[in-house]
Amino acid sequence: MIIRIAYYPDPVKSRTPGYPKQDVANVLKLDPTLSLRRIDNLDDLSTDNYDVVLFPGGFAPNTLEELGDDGEAKIKAFVNAGGGFVGICAGAYLGSNWGWGLIDAELPYINRWARGKTDSCILDLKNVTPSGAEFNARKKIICRYANGPLLVCGTGVQPLATFMSELRGKKNKYPSEMSGTAAIAMGKCGKGTVVLQSPHLESSSDVYVQSLFLGMFRCAAGLTETTSTLTPETTTPETREILETSTPGPGDCACMEAVIDDKEAMPPASNKLPLTNCLVCLESDGYSVAGQPHVTSVNAALPIVFTAPHGLQVYRQYESGKRGLHFRERWSTEIAVKLAVAAGKRKAAALPSSFVVWNYKTAKRKDPNNLDPNYLLDDEQTISPFSSGLKHFRRLPGPRFHVDVHGKKDRKHNLNLDVGLEPMHAEWPIKDQTKGLSATVGQAFETFFKGRKTETFRSRAQGASGRMPFGVETSPRLHGYWGEDTVKTVSHQSVLDGMPALQLEIPYTMRSKLVSDDEFFAGWSEALLSAIDAWLQTVGEDAGAVEAEEQDKSTAMGCPVRLDEATCLAMLDDLKAMDLRQIGREKMI
């Protein structure tokens, strides 16, 4: 079934170049069962011609004035007859009691509407389905907000998401009243379903948020009781046919396999991935997913997962409300992927090991939604693809281990590799295991570097003089631990979830050597991987000695893939080309 959507943008702003934005149309294109048609009047608006009418962002009084009483009557007749209504931002004002009163949604703070704009509005999704079955799996999302209404739901109206953010207008002149009010609401109007969305989910690059947005139209069309589960049970035959006749790319989309090959093998409801993710997976390169700013490759056969959280310019949200910027750590993504390939080669006929990295092809530059995975509060971890991917990996059978790859600046007096284990020292209950890990990894690198002691390098640090060899430091200042009851690093998150982890801080000159000298990388990676293997064999099942915290149930990792070596090598070639293009264009560490 094709859902026919009538699209009526702001009639005044439509005369302005650049309006309406293409975000709505671009996201709706991801689902071939949704057909969007712009209309400039309501003459043909009937359930014979359309299934849903959409009023997007703009300035609500413009539309009210243009359509008048006659337009209001046509809208109400359409919805009462069974047509759906989706209102975004200005459209949500129109569907509320302030506008046409399609559902009982009050706007008690209408006089304080100019709250401001942000790309980092946080929504709580705990009530996003009537049954609480599907989207409780993703408790929070980040999206754009631009002066949308604060909805207070009345009789027969359900809040699907509430605001967690608090915008108070210029100079914080408004009282704190935004947090806790409904951001998305749903209700019935006659035979039709009305969905009001205050923020702009359509502007998100997060595949999960996009699928939620798409589901609102299925809900408004009366095809599902929930906003969007988009699982095989609720997709149309047309959408299932697209999936079932698709040929997986070189990366073999894991969630596509679950749908196609073994319906009984679908993960439990809390882990279901929106089917829209599969519709956009994979791009021709074999690893990219449109709208997904990261690559999560999962290979359950190998025990190690590698991450590079600073392979992209990312943002930190400080408690003061200010945002911080962390520059890209050059070659950290490349090293993480190379390590995954090396780990696979050590096992006969094995695919590369698991990894989670940013995707420079699909990630938006300077996007505040790209939160620093190494600086997250507990609530923020639910919307981080790195946190979600690590939790998914941790729950696979057998001992698991996490290596977090970072880059640091060269030091004036040494070019040491930092092996950070402070989260293990602070949280791991079996202290001798942590000491053993530190000694094993430290000794392996020390032996490797001593074998190359005649090889010296110049530090890039200001004031450094002469040449120096590489070395290793197992009690470094950059150790991966911010402290208790505060933000968590990626390695700290893993340790708290019962997975041993270490953080590698690699000086710039060593990183340069690792990506340019295959013989050096082979020896360096073997030192690391053999040390981890030896430690895992010693501790055995005790590698999960910490009892995992309650499962986050987030599906922020989007669409996981299982990449083969050839695809990873092609990805490395793409990363090399990207890196060369960015020289002089962005700051990096």
Image (cartoon, helix red, strand yellow):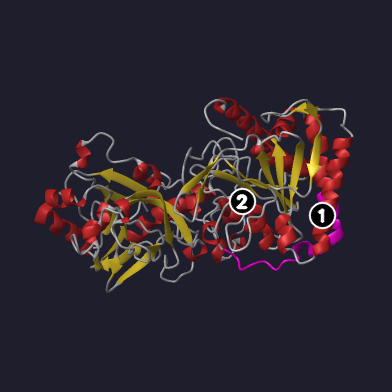
Query: In this figure, which residue is indicated by the disc labeled 1?
Result: 437
Q: Position of residue 278 (x, y in %)?
A: 52, 49
The answer, for residue 241, to whether it is visible in the render is no
Q: Nearer the viewer, residue 518 or 74?
A: 518
Q: Quadrant of residue 159?
A: bottom left
How many circles with numbers are drawn on the protein? 2
**The one of 193 and 116 positioned closer to us in this rendering:** 116
Q: Name the residue: 17% across, 51% down.
A: 61
Q: Single out the residue that lies furthest toward the left.
A: 69
* Region rendered in magenta: 531-552
- As for residue 545 lying within the magenta part, the answer is yes
Q: Could you say which is closer to the camera, residue 217 or residue 3? A: 217
For the residue marked with disc 2, what is the amino acid? Ala
Q: Residues within 10 Å of mark 1 (few under 14, many from 20)?
A: many
Q: Identify residue type, mark 1.
A: Leu
Q: Quadrant of residue 550?
A: bottom right
Q: Earlier in the sequence, mark 1 or mark 2?
A: 2
